[in-house]
Structures are given as C-alpha cells and as structure tokens.
Image: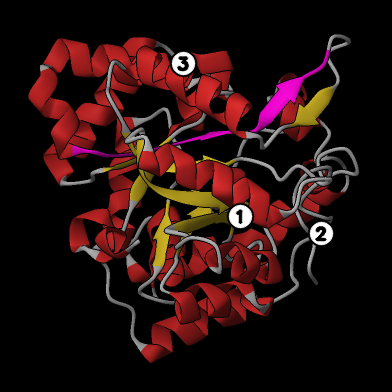
C-alpha cells in the first residue's frame, strides 16, 4: 500500500477505542480524537464492523456528517469484516463474497461514504483457500467499494499465496516491544512484497505507557480479564518489567508511549502503528513518537530495557487464539 508510506500516513488511529473495549467512552470523545488527528495531520483510521457492533463506524460517520463531506477526503479509511456469529452466538469466520460485500455495504452506510480505502478480512475462514478469499476481496475492488485489500493476523506464507492472486496492500498484526513474533517472517515478507504492516496494540494495551491500566479496572474489561498477560501474577510482573522502559523515557524526557511508537517506526518504513486511545492528551503523546528520531544508542537502551522475550504470559488466551494464524 504505497500511500501509507507517505509521512502523513505513517501513523494511524486504531478505532476499536471508539467503542468501549478498553473502558467507557462517548461519541463526543471519539470526535475529539478525530479533530485532534486532523489538527496533527494524522489521516489513517482503522476500524471494523465488529468494533462496538458497528458503533465505531457510526461514530466516524457522524463525525463526517458533522464536519462536512469534504472532511472524508482528508482521511484514509480502513475497515474489516469476516467475523460473525451463528444462531447460538458462537463465533464464526466467513470469507465468501456474499458475506463480505453485505458487511462492507453496512459499514459504508454507517460511515456515510461510498467506498473505503482499504478492506481487510478480519479473520481467515479455515476451510476456504486464501486464494478464494483474496478473489472475493478483489471483486470488491472491481465493484468500486474498496480501493485496496488486506488481511488481519495471517502468516507470511498465507500472505505470499494471497499476493499471487491480487496485490495485498496491508496486513494487520499485533506488533510492539511486547509482541515481537512478526519479526520471525511477517516484517520481512511485507517488506519484500511492498505490503504495509499495520501494527495494532503498539503500546502493549497500556503496558508500554506511563500509566498502565489499574489492576482494579482489568476485571471489568472482558478481553483483558482473560488475557494471560493481564491476569495475576503475570500482570504485576509485566508492570514491573516495563518500569525499565518508563525509566528510560523519563531520562530522555519523553512519554513512554512515544518511545514505544518511535521504536516501532524504526523497525521499517513499511510499518504503520495504529494505537487506540480515549484521551486527546494521550493521543498527542502517541503522535510525538511518530515525530521522534532515535539514535543507535537510544535503540540499544530501549532493547536493553525490554529485550526480546521479556513478557510474562502469552499474548492471547486459548480462546482468543482461535482465528489468528500461528507461524512460529
């Protein structure tokens, strides 16, 4: 996705936070983040049909409606589909054209736009060859409903198979100082193919910030309440470990989150972090990271503070691992 390599698109907004995934928020609060993004030149918005059951996309749509139609042209908009529920509310994955197109049509309606800039398959359907799924996405390009296509949480080998069918603009994967598995093939394959690696949770779901989530809050957040890195005793150990990064950030006079973002951007010019936040002040700290230049000494200090493999606990629980492709 060459356009994401432009300076204005080397950093984006992870719009999962426009729902209440990490705590309660409001539409007005989401609009404030988008206003700040406009002011700071951040143009990439990464959302999904399942974030707050469409609520994230609806907030984006009301923002465009309130600010005027021309506002949409200033943003690069990505959404996803492919996760659904059966009659018994069990999670399923569908990658067929009928499902993807119906979900994208609903997303476009919620956002009040005619097309998105990027459409991902959120999770692969295991019994469908990725070539067939890629073909379904390609039809959405032909129909003018998305300009480019991508996948979320796929293996490097799957990316190469998909790319043989149609150019893959972006692959979304968790990547940060806390989660470095993409360095075992995905970072390299994306670079080889000219595919943007869109890094979600780039500040480790708050661990790589000045103020990690309070242990008292975590039980109220369904995803984190069962996530191995956020349950006792792992969470306390992870906060203690990341205190070393906070010490480096204090010594440098920078927000810890900014340091985490800057480190990630130094891993390749094809990498785009998409942190989510409900705070304009925190958003500005994150943007600072996109404006920092780290020296070799800075990078060494960061890596010394948080070497590969420092985290306590897997990044997903057994249930949360259903869908993402493991490749290492």
Q: CA distance from mark 1 to mark 2?
A: 16 Å
Residue 281: quadrant of the picture: top left
On the image, numbered disc 1 is attached to which residue?
A: 174
Q: Residue at x 29, y 15 (%)?
A: 112
Q: Is residue 284 above or below residue 192?
A: above
Structural crowding at the residue carrying mark 3, measured as other residues with C-alpha within 10 Å and reported as few (<14), some (14–19) or many (≥20) = some
Asked if labels 3 and 2 touch by Cβ distance under 8 angstroms, the answer is no
Residue 32: quadrant of the picture: top left
Percent x, y for residue 303?
A: 57, 80
Answer with mark 3 or mark 1, whichever residue precedes in sequence. 3
Q: CA distance from mark 2 to mark 3?
A: 40 Å
Q: Nearer the viewer, mark 2 or mark 3?
A: 3
On the image, numbered disc 3 is attached to which residue?
A: 106
Q: Nearer the viewer, residue 213 or 87?
A: 87
Q: Residue at x 60, y 44 (%)?
A: 205
Percent x, y for residue 310?
A: 74, 70
Asked if labels 1 and 3 touch by Cβ distance under 8 angstroms, the answer is no
Helix, strand or loop under label 2: loop
Helix, strand or loop under label 3: helix
Q: CA distance from mark 3 to mark 1?
A: 26 Å
**Quadrant of the image containing the N terminus:** bottom left
Residues drawn in magenta: 75-86
Q: Is residue 38 above or below residue 127?
A: above
On the image, numbered disc 2 is attached to which residue?
A: 312
Percent x, y for residue 155?
A: 70, 64
* Colouring scheme applied when the structure was drawn: secondary structure
């Amino acid at each position: 996705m060459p356009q994401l390599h432009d300076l204005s698109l080397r950093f984006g907004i992870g719009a999962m936070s426009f729902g209440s995934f990490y705590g309660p928020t409001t539409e007005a609060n989401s609009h404030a983040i988008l206003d700040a993004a406009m002011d700071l030149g951040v143009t990439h918005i990464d959302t999904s049909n399942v974030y707050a059951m469409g609520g994230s996309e609806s907030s984006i749509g009301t923002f465009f409606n309130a600010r005027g139609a021309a506002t949409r042209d200033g943003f690069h908009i990505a959404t996803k589909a492919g996760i659904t529920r059966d009659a018994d509310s069990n999670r399923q994955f569908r990658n067929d054209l009928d499902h993807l197109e119906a979900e994208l049509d609903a997303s476009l309606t919620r956002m009040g736009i005619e097309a998105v800039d990027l459409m991902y398959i959120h999770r692969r359907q295991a019994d469908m060859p990725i070539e067939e799924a890629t073909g379904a996405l390609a039809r959405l390009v032909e129909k003018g409903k998305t300009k480019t296509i991508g996948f979320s949480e796929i293996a490097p080998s799957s990316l190469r198979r998909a790319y043989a069918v149609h150019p893959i603009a972006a692959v979304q994967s968790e990547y940060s100082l806390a989660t470095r598995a993409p360095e075992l093939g995905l970072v390299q394959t994306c670079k080889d193919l000219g595919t943007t690696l869109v890094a979600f949770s780039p500040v480790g779901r708050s661990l790589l910030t000045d103020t990690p989530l309070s242990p008292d809050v975590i039980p109220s957040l369904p995803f984190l309440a069962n996530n191995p890195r956020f349950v006792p005793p792992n969470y306390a150990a992870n906060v203690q470990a990341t205190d070393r990064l906070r010490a480096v950030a204090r010594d440098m006079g920078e927000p810890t989150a900014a340091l985490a973002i800057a480190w990630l951007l130094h891993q390749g010019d094809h990498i785009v972090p998409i942190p989510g936040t409900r705070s304009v002040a925190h958003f500005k700290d994150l943007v600072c990271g996109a404006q920092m230049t780290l020296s070799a000494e800075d990078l060494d200090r960061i890596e010394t503070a948080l070497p590969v493999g420092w985290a306590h606990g897997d990044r997903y629980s057994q249930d949360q691992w259903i869908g993402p492709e493991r490749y290492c």
